[in-house]
Image (cartoon, helix red, strand yellow):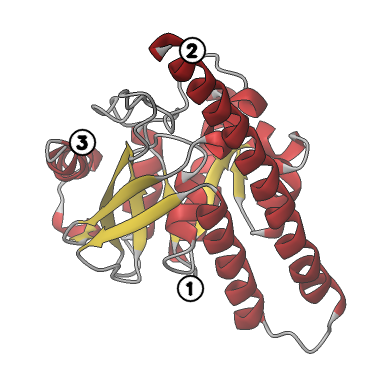
Amino acid sequence: MDRKFYYYSRETGLGLRYVRAVLRIWGAVIVTIPLLVLYHFFSFVSHQQRNNIIRYWYASMVWFSGLTICCYGKPANVHLVSNHVTYLDIPVLGSLQDVRFVSKSEVASWPVIGYFARLANTIFIERTNRHLKSYITHLTYEYSSSTNICIFPEGTSTDGKSIRPFKSSLFQAAINAAKNQNIFIQPVTLNYMNTSNLYGEREEVFSWVGNYPLLPHLWRVLKNKSGNVDVIYHKPLRVADFENRKSLIAANEEAISSGIKRK
């Protein structure tokens, strides 16, 4: 009798997870359509209002993913350097401040995601050695502009338990820009935790690593009931205070790693 009740309860729970995922998808669509209309077709919408629309959309996507954001420290309205755990990093950070993200060029051609990445003014770069000089020049210009940018210098997403060595070329652009003006970078640590406790287990849901296909992983996230993401803003670093990119990278790695150790 106990075994039958347990099995029935498990199937019921799985059914609720599917319903939850479908409702979240519909909710995201219902929110997105009017925002797209407002963004595209109303000429009176100013540049800042467009940025506000993007931030509201990011915040909505975070909510529909079941995540609650917990901030430690404050965003300093400067450029960001963050560890990279999942595609959810972008709406999480984008919901907290106006920022443009740097992404590999192939993301621009991804279905749906590429479209929204272009709408959000993502900076796409070719990361091959052949294009190294041109993308450093491009990023140097972006660091010098009035808009804050965010880089994920690991170059790929991880399980969030540690960081990979940072790509030095992304920091060379900041050093180049700092020759002509004050450039500040704020390290940020992202920690995700699944707060759902289904059948006595708390499985890892949010990190997107390896060759896990995007859509099955997103479906898994949407079925999950809830989770937290800690966003830890560390002290901003003045790029000109560092002798070279090696020391700048080391300072960012140390700050971000210190936040991961809080898990």
Q: Does label 3 or label 2 sit earlier along the sequence?
A: 2
| Residue at 34% across, 47% down | 228
Q: Height in image: 48 above or below 22?
A: below
Q: Nearer the viewer, mark 3 or mark 2?
A: 2
Q: x and y percent of residue 94 in the render?
A: 49, 60
Q: Nearer the viewer, mark 1 or mark 3?
A: 1
Residue that badge 3 annotates: 246
Asked if the residue at tag 1 contacts the one at tag 2, i.e. Cβ–Cβ closer than 8 Å, the answer is no
Residue that badge 2 annotates: 4
Q: x and y percent of residue 149 in the render?
A: 46, 58
Give amino acid for label 3: Lys
Q: x and y percent of residue 6 in the render?
A: 44, 18
Position of 54 with respect to 200 (left or right) is: right
Residue that badge 1 annotates: 146
Q: Is residue 91 something that shows in the picture?
A: yes
Q: x and y percent of residue 233 in the render?
A: 23, 58
Gap between marks 1 and 3, in whole Å? 26 Å
